[in-house]
Amino acid sequence: MDPGNYIILSSILFCIGALGVLLRRNAIVVFMSVELMLNAANLAFVTFARMHGNLEGQAIAFFVMIVAAAEVVVGLAIIMTIFRTRRSVSIDEPHLLRN
Amino acid sequence: MRSLLLLAAETGETGGTGEEITFWICGTLAVLGALGLIFSRKTVHSALSVAVTMINLAVLFLINEAPFLGLVQVIVYTGAVMMLFLFVLMLVGVDTSDSFIETLKGQRIAAVLLILGFGILVIAAVGTALDGMVSVGLVEANSLYGGNVEGLAQQMFTTYLLALEVVAALIITAGLGAVVLAHRERWEPKLGQPEQSVIRMERYKETGEHPGPLPTPGVLATSNAVGTPALLPDGSPSDLSIPGPLRGEIHSRIPDQPQEIAADVDEVRSIASGEETERPEILNPISGHEDPEIEEADDERGEQ
Amino acid sequence: MNLTSLQLPLSELPEEPVEALTGTLPAEAAGGYFPYMWLLVALPAFGALVLLVGGKRTNAWGHLLACLLPIGSFVLACLLLAQMMGAPVEDRLVTLEMWDWTFAGMFDVPFALRLDQLSMVFVMLISGVGSLIHIYSIGYMAEDPDRRKFFAYLNLFVAAMLLLVLANNYLLLYVGWEGVGLASYLLIGFWQYKSSAAVAAKKAFVMNRVGDVGLSVAVMLMFVTFGTVTFEQVFAAAPEAGDTALNLIGLALLLAAVGKSAQFPLQAWLLDAMEGPTPVSALIHAATMVTAGVYLIVRSNAIFDLASIAVTAVLAVGIITMVAGAVIACAKDEIKKSLAGSTMSQIGYMFVAAGLGPAGYVFAIFHLLMHGMFKADLFLSAGSVMHGMKDEKNMRFYGALRKVMLVTTIAFICGFLGISGLPPFDSFFSKDDIIKAALGTNWFAGVAAIAAAGLTAFYMTRMLSMTFFGDKRWKEEADPHESPSVMTVPMLLLSVGALFGGLFFVYVGDIVGWLDPITGYQPFVLPINDTVLEIVTLVVVLTGITLAWRQYASRPVPQQPPQQVSVFTTAARNSLYDDAFNEAVFMRPGQYLTRWLVWFDNQVVDGAVRGIASKVSGAGEQVKRLQTGFARSYALLMVGGAVLIGVVFVVARWL
């Protein structure tokens, strides 16, 4: 099985995730797109681990998962806090840092 | 499916055909899920699409000789992270939907072009770099310490020990952070039941607002849904009796003709008071026509 | 060259060329009065200091002190002269080193005084004529409340001029040069409340300054070429320098001399300088300061001998001014302005003589000495006339003054005889020598000199007849009276010099023999016979006198200048349009230039600065638009950056 295929799949998923970040306005959807990008990276890591024959890639993918989990926790807490005050989860809303 | 996967995982050198078929199916589904994420109008649909993608990725991990990671993916990502997302979605409003009108000028086109460019770049680069490369396979690495899990454990507790500890601290900090962020400071004392009823009475005194509980939803023969409104004594439906999120949609659930029911009620009254002697027409409840058989039965009863 | 017996026996000019001396004797070795020669400068300087610093307290006796000090210098000068005359010729060049003045690397200039035959002549002239004019000024400025200041400035002038001629190097000479320029400015503008005087002072100073640039450049060039500016060393090294360097130095020195001596093209200030009090005009603008230029050229003869272009330039300048000055003098109605034109012309004679090379240097100095005496005499007489006519300056309102002011008339007539060239008075010797030397070297110069001699006679006779002869043309309130003796005695003393100076210096003093160790001498060859030349000159002079007499003494002189005159007269009345020329060529373009520079500074320089500032802020405004505040725009930019980096990597790998 050509490992290149996995990498290409990972790239495609990454790009779709990036598109989601850029095009969607709902904060939660944006966040999920970021998670998708992280997962795509994980896939790449695992594939490389297999390619080179050692488990370091998997270890790194594991760490990525942990950190992503932590990040999700904090990020969602922030979204909740903002939602409480502004009653909106659009990421276009807070644009006070302009000009 | 499971046996196939386990077989693939244990043999290491995953078979060409099996792996390929799995890859193509799971890969396609993963991409479709991703597309669903970005193209869904409702947020809940996006969340569920992501979950689909993640499960498929877990399978891909499994066939990539990373069984531990695949299962961790299911447990942690799909199970924990995505559920967390869904909880927050519920809190925010489960039926929120994005309008698809783009407010920033040129954002859509620029984003598509750039991402396309990026994708082509990466794929071309990787394709050139990995041309003709064959993976070494993890059979040896996995069996070095007697299994994938043991191998990973070996990596983590020796080479990456420091990173592990730091990440552990990170997770704890993140949890604490979430607690702090979600904390709502109570500026006034918590209102218990006695205080609440006092407040209610005061409000009734001032504004005439009804102090009692809200009416329960009405359940009539036509429907047993929680969205059916109760009827007030004058026959009009009561908005208050329906749970909040469903309030806008009651009009499709009320019985069809309030006037008909009122007519029925009058009839019953008149019969009960004996004014009306003529029997009302009895209609076949199913066909809606007069039923001569029932009329005959009725006549007989009346004669007796 | 020997002359035939028909003429009066004139100077015994040497037959062979004479080389200039170069060795110098230190003052201590010379002994006698030489070590005290610094007192020559110090005495008047002290006077100036006391009078200026002392202020009003010295009003009562200040002018007397100021008179005594130059007299003291004169006495010392006489003693030094006696000593010098007693010494052998090689010992006559004495240097007094006073202290180390500037030393900057190679540029080592001492504060040293040099007394030789040339300086001696000047020292005598300056201190002698200066003292007489100081005495005259006691009377002339008797009613002026600022008399003390006047004497302070006069003393300052005498000190500076003495420093100029006694300096041992060009830099110290420059100090004296500037000092006399300053004194001239202060004295011309002495009556500050008169705006015409203030303007004239400024004009004189500025035009002097233009010339002074020449002296600075010369000093710099000398340093670059010779590495030193001391006279002995420069003159010794001159033959080794290149032609270009010598010519440039010569031209620069000429520029300086032209500015100070009011020669063409920097002559416009001299006529305006007559705004100052008459003693000032007599001392500074007749006898001494304006002769500083001639001194400079003659002193630098070692350079000019080797710089043919510069020497030709000197000659040209001299010829032009000699003729132009005479023409202007013929048409001016104010007595002092006419005399100023005469000064220009006579100094032109000296420049012509200096421009003839070794053949003429001694005659330039000789004529300078004569001119100092008779011109001072003429100016003092004019001052006496003005004093008596209540400061009326226009000769058309004089006339028949001989009947009232006899002493002044006699003094003026003596001066007139001195300048005219009639034998056996001053100019017969000095001017004729110049004419002969000129003819011997360059026939054009000679002819011009003869023509100028005729013009000189003409305008002097004109002045004489308009002022002292003819009919009375006085104004209503005029009350002419003779001047007090404090004024007339100096005039008469100078008249003696004007009459007999020539005879004295040729027969008793032998000026040529005295000077030629310093300047060198080259005999000249005349194309025509001596005697014939003298007779021709005499005829020209007499013609001039007769014409003027007929015009101004025999016929009545109109009180308003006649308007129907030839174009030459109009031009001469307007000083040959020199002011108009200066204004058109220098002043107006200069004003345009300054105005344009201001515009340039405002628009271009400031504009560039402001333009840069506005461009930067404009760029800032454009960049500001990137900050939309939307997280998604920023994310887009990030992706863009990532794509860019990726492209760079790929391309780098490719290449």
Image (cartoon, coloured by chain):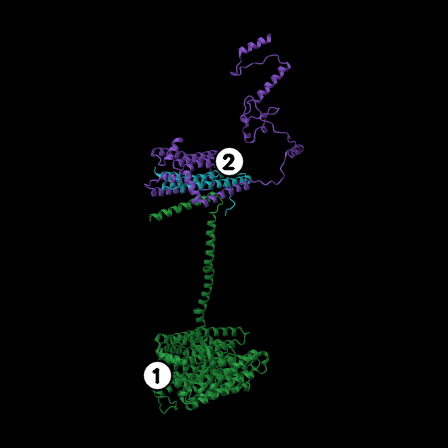
Chain colours: A cyan, B purple, C green
Closer to the camera in the image, B302 or C152: B302
Query: x and y percent of residue B219 in the render?
Result: 57, 24
Q: Chain of mark 1?
A: C
Disc 1 secondary structure class = helix
Q: Residue furthest left?
A: B132
Closer to the camera in the image, C119 or C89: C89
Disc 2 secondary structure class = helix
Q: Can residue A36 be seen here?
A: yes
C-alpha gap between disc 2 and disc 1: 123 Å
Q: Can residue C370 be seen here?
A: no
Query: x and y percent of residue C81 in the render?
Result: 45, 88
Q: Residue furthest right?
A: B205
Closer to the camera in the image, C634 or B8: B8
- A26 relative to C272, above or below: above
Q: Determine the image quadrant of residue A52.
A: top left
Residue on which the image places disc 2 = B89
Q: Chain of mark 2?
A: B
Residue on which the image places disc 1 = C440
Closer to the camera in the image, B211 or C50: B211
Q: Determine the image quadrant of residue C89.
A: bottom left
Query: x and y percent of residue B284 in the render?
Result: 53, 15
Pick the quarter of the image with the N terminus of chain C.
bottom left
Name the amino acid, label 2.
Answer: Leu
Give the crowd class for mark 1: few <14, some 14-19, many >=20 residues within 10 Å: some
Kindly report which numbered mark, 2 or 1, lies closer to the viewer in this rendering. 2
- C332 relative to B251, above or below: below
Using residue B121 as the reference point, say whether residue A82 is left or right of it: right
**Residue at 62% from the left image edge and 17% from the top image edge:** B269
Query: x and y percent of residue C258 in the render?
Result: 42, 76
Give the crowd class for mark 2: few <14, some 14-19, many >=20 residues within 10 Å: many
